[in-house]
Image (spheres, coloured by chain):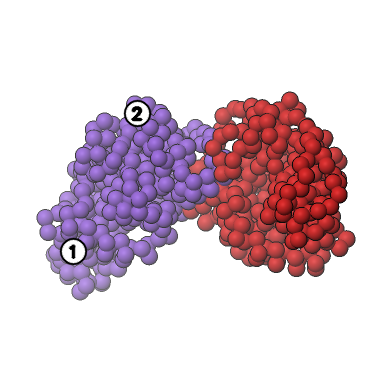
Chain colours: A red, B purple
């Protein structure tokens, strides 16, 4: 038992389900008084919380792989913070922990809800929300378990300047890809992909149709497509897939906030002619790969093989703006909110 | 060496590449004088030739898995016939043979181009072009290698009254499917699916949107979709696929003769939410399964477990009409041309 530090928690709640683009009115921020710590409970001052595209799905109540956010209650999501009060011998004050009680600046729960992680020498704990966490694992699982990337193959990644996309490009190269192509939404991001992240080619999807640009950048075709965007990106990729190509569908951010019926790819027949396979996935079904991934990524990271960007928004009160910015592509690399 | 019997061959040639629906003007029928038999050659009087949807692809010169028909030359395709003259000890006169020299009433080539098959007691040799041949193998490969059908699962087959479709429905049941649903283009075919082929439910896609009908017929969702049609059928199937469902794309007959850009499925995001996988295939990559299939099908056939229909068109001179009829769905079961 420690003194009653951080006794209030500022939290963001969903109050209505957005139809199309979420607006500020769909959320409210409240400050609640925390109970005294119960036995085996800990209190954590969050340092960073994650905003992720999948959260848009949880704001709707359509059937999905993950339950929707409950209206009028505080949302959750990935966060990293430090124990500030503890009635658990396993998690003493000062321990850095990773957990799912995001969208609040202080989290309190049974010790089992938190996992201790190492302080990284010279690096931000927020990396546990990105390249060293679920984001990086998502990239790894998509390339290996879903798309069966083989050495020498050509990979195309949509939304390549995002958190998952920058991980995909680098991990693909480290796994032996022959050529890595990415798409992004600005010339600055395109330059970053080529100069910092080692992409062989990149296109700005806002300046000309993806279909035209991709055909030019992939004269030898594409073997593996890692999709974060959907829509025109998926259609363009199908066009250029080599025989026996694999498409891993991870996200479809272009579709998440539209209320229109989305017209699908006009070239589905290519799946038959080219013996293509496509598979959608969500990380929850592949958490058994975490150990393998952590081992490989720790080594790559220690060897200085991994670049990353973070877009950091300050303050829990700006978390909704951060999420909306993410939906519009305002981030480069992982988007996090600094809550401390 | 035998007497010079069947010395002429009537053959169908492609003279122009159809844009959209093929017409009679895209073809010509010629009668050629055959050379004397060379050493090791045989001459075969074809009894039946196959017309198949995949042949539409070969009439175009777009890149595909199988070379296009050559303009001004005789088309080829599956056929079954009997040796009428032989300079090969392996294939004496009278042998029933299966081969790829269709679209002609008499075929002549090296013995290696023909494979001897058994005369079936009480059944037509044309079955080697259907359920006992590539058609049946296509159904089997799609359900097993591509879609990994498991016992108890629900299967939806589009174009279910066609040659592949009737095979899919029956083989799915024999492999333990829990519920088998099919689509067809007339009430008569729908009745046939349920009464003769053991489908649990079937819909007529011409009377109401597939999307509406399928949702009603599959209240528990679909685990395996075997697609011969594409377009609205694929879109409807995606809607109702259960989590981890598999889609095997075998054909897209709704798309083969359209010159319009085909709007794709509007529900591709479902692949991510439902962890769906989809794979297009062509039989040529899976011929290694022929032995396994022949063994199983021989047993099922001998046990009287297999029903079939054939739509037989008489005369090589009507082969083009037969093919066009196939494209329009005029057949029930396998469409063949009797060439003898």
Query: Which element carries disc 1, helix, strand or loop?
Result: loop
- Residue B17's label in the rendered image is none
Q: Position of residue A300 (x, y in %)?
A: 76, 66
Residue closest to the eye, B272 or A336: A336
Whether marks 1 and 2 lie on the same chain: yes
Q: Position of residue B144 (x, y in %)?
A: 38, 57
Q: Nearer the viewer, mark 1 or mark 2?
A: 2
The residue positioned 20% from the left and 53% from the top of the image is: B305
Residue closest to the eye, A63 or B182: A63
Task: Identify the image quadrant of the C terminus of chain A.
Answer: top right
Mark 2, other Cα within 10 Å: few <14 / some 14–19 / many ≥20: few
In the rendered structure, the answer to whether residue B198 lies left or right of residue B155 reads left
Label 1, label 2: how far apart the Cα atoms are:
41 Å
Taking the view exactly as shown, the residue that stands out farthest to the left is B122
Query: Which element carries disc 2, helix, strand or loop?
Result: loop
- Residue B206's label in the rendered image is 2
Q: Earlier in the sequence, mark 1 or mark 2?
A: 1
**Across the whole image, how many numbered discs are drawn on residues?**
2
Look at mark 1 in the image and give the residue it sits on.
B118
Taking the view exactly as shown, the residue that stands out farthest to the bottom is B89
Q: Chain of mark 2?
A: B
Residue B154 lies, with reference to residue B233, above or below; the image says below
């Amino acid at each position: 038992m420690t003194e009653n530090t951080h006794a209030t928690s500022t939290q963001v709640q969903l109050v209505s389900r957005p139809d199309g683009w979420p607006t500020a009115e769909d959320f409210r921020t409240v400050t609640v008084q925390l109970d005294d710590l119960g036995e085996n409970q800990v209190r954590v001052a969050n340092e960073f919380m994650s905003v992720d595209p999948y959260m848009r799905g949880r704001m709707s109540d359509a059937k999905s792989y993950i339950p929707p956010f409950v209206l009028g209650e505080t949302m959750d999501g990935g966060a990293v913070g430090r124990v500030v009060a503890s009635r658990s011998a396993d998690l003493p004050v000062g321990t850095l922990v990773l957990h799912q009680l995001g969208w609040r600046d202080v989290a309190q729960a049974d010790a089992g809800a938190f996992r201790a992680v190492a302080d990284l020498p010279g690096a931000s704990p927020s990396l546990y929300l990105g390249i060293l966490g679920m984001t990086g694992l998502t990239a790894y699982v998509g390339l290996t378990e879903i798309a069966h990337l083989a050495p020498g193959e050509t990979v195309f990644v949509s939304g390549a300047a995002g958190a998952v996309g920058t991980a995909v490009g680098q991990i693909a190269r480290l796994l032996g890809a022959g050529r890595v192509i990415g798409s992004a939404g600005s010339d600055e991001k395109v330059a970053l992909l080529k100069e910092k992240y080692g992409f062989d080619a990149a296109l700005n999807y806002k300046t000309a149709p993806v279909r035209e640009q991709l055909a030019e950048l992939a004269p030898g075709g594409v073997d593996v497509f890692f999709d974060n965007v959907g829509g025109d990106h998926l259609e363009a990729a199908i066009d250029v897939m080599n025989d026996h190509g694999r498409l891993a569908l991870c996200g479809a951010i272009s579709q998440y906030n539209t209320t229109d019926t989305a017209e699908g790819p006009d070239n589905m027949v290519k799946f038959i002619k080219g013996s293509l396979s496509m598979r959608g996935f969500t990380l929850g079904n592949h958490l058994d790969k975490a150990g393998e991934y952590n081992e490989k990524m720790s080594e790559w990271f220690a060897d200085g093989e991994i670049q990353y960007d973070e877009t950091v928004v300050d303050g829990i009160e700006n978390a909704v703006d951060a999420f909306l910015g993410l939906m519009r592509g305002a981030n480069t690399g992982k988007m996090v909110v600094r809550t401390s």
